[in-house]
Amino acid sequence: MKKLYSFSLLFLTVLSLNASEKAANIEFKELTHDFGTIQEGEKPIYKFEFTNTGDAPLIINSVNKSCGCTEPEFSKEPIAPGETGYITVGYNSVGRNGRFDKSLTVNSNAKDGSVRLRITGTVVTGDAGN
């Protein structure tokens, strides 16, 4: 009986360790997007594509922006293992001129915790972009 109890305890311990090892993993196709040259006033949008390469549902908790000029959107629904999702970001170039380099920090339950994305480009006024 003691052996059966010991075996059962060992089995449950191994089972719980295996269950706790499951984790989501976020893998982006690219971490940086260059909008190139845009005219002042334009509001370009880009979709960063990612895949949950882990073995547990991925939950995006937040996307923190480095500037009020960026507008990120993301799904609040869990992304199943193997599924694809998007972080969409818009850049508001109104009143801005010159080179920009802005970042977004994606916070999730993935084993790495957070990922930094970047958008870059140059805003020109008038006919400077032609």
Image (cartoon, grey):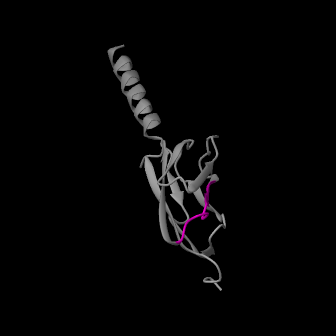
Quadrant the C terminus occupies: bottom right
Q: Nearer the viewer, residue 32 or 39?
A: 39
The residue located at (64%, 45%) in the rendering is 75
- Residue 91 location in percent, x, y? 60, 61
Q: How many marks?
A: 0
- The residue sitting at 58% across, 57% down in the picture is 50
> Would you say 80 lies left or right of 68 here?
right
Q: Nearer the viewer, residue 26 or 31?
A: 31
Q: Quadrant of residue 49?
A: bottom right
Give the side of residue 5 with respect to residue 107, left or right. left
**Residue 62: x %, y % from top left:** 52, 43
Q: Which residues are magenta?
A: 86-97
Viewer-nearest residue: 17 or 99: 99
Measured as percent of width and height from the top left, residue 51 is found at 58, 55
Question: Is residue 82 a member of the stretch shown in magenta?
Answer: no
90 is within the stretch colored magenta: yes
Q: Residue 119 in the image: x percent, y percent?
A: 52, 65
Q: Residue at x 63, y 41 (%)?
A: 76
The residue shown at (49%, 55%) is: 67
Query: In the rendered image of this protein, does residue 126 appear above or below residue 72?
Result: below
